[in-house]
Amino acid sequence: MPWLTAEQIQNYGLWLQSGAIFFSMVGVIISIRATRKIARRRATLDLIMSHQSNEFLYKQRQEFIALRDAGNIVQWAALDKAASEQQSTIRAALNRYELIAIGIKEKTLEGRVYKKYTRSGLVQDWRACKPWVMQMRQNHRVPVYYCEVEALAKKWATREERIHC
């Protein structure tokens, strides 16, 4: 009398084959997730590098910082300033932040990496631009202008910073 019958050996073979398929599938899923994470990090680093190395974006950022630091940024939200270079500069900065916030929310960009790079700058810029955004929302009766960057700034703000976010 043999120790294992042919039927038992066949059953064990099916179980082993099913187990191999299952573990292969788990391996593929893990590999896909790791690849996505690497792609998000790479996209985030590429974005950061482009902001640093693109002369036009760098110059535009410097113009925005000058407006932000001059104070009273809300003056550029007036309807008669719609075509002004200053309003265009403010919009460009906030549009970039909005796009980045959407990318982080949709997991196209790696929020943790971007946060390490520019958390304080994003929060500072939002705090300075909030009155401008609120005025633009009122002027155009669109309550969701820059809502993604607002949510991200509030999420990343410290307890002290949240008072003004």
Image: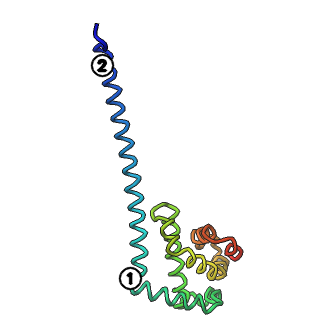
Residue 84 in the image: state x and y as whole percent: 54, 91
- Mark nearer the N terminus (2 vs 1): 2
Per the rendering, the mark at residue 53 is 1
Quick check: 42 above or below 17? below
Coloured how?
Answer: rainbow
In this rendering, which labeled residue sits more in front, label 2 or label 1? 2
Q: Is residue 38 left or right of residue 77?
A: left
Few, some or many C-alpha atoms within 10 Å of disc 2 (few <14, some 14-19, many ≥20)?
Answer: few
Residue 23 in the image: state x and y as whole percent: 37, 38
Q: Which of 64/49 is in front?
A: 49
Please identify the quadrant where the N terminus is shown.
top left
Few, some or many C-alpha atoms within 10 Å of disc 1 (few <14, some 14-19, many ≥20)?
Answer: few
Of all residues, the one furthest to the right in this rendering is 163
Q: Which of 11/97 is in front?
A: 11
Q: In this view, does 44 lie to the left or right of 118?
A: left
Quick check: 2 above or below 73? above
Residue type indicated by callout 2: Ile
Residue in view at x 65 percent, y 71 percent:
158
Residue in view at x 44 percent, y 86 percent:
58
Quick check: 33 above or below 62? above
State the CA–CA distance, disc 2 to disc 1: 64 Å
Q: Mark 2 points at which residue?
A: 9
Q: Which of 159/75 is in front?
A: 159
Residue type indicated by callout 1: Ser
Residue 136 in the image: state x and y as whole percent: 63, 80
Whether label 2 touches label 1, CB < 8 Å: no
Residue 87 in the image: state x and y as whole percent: 55, 87
Quick check: 150 above or below 34? below
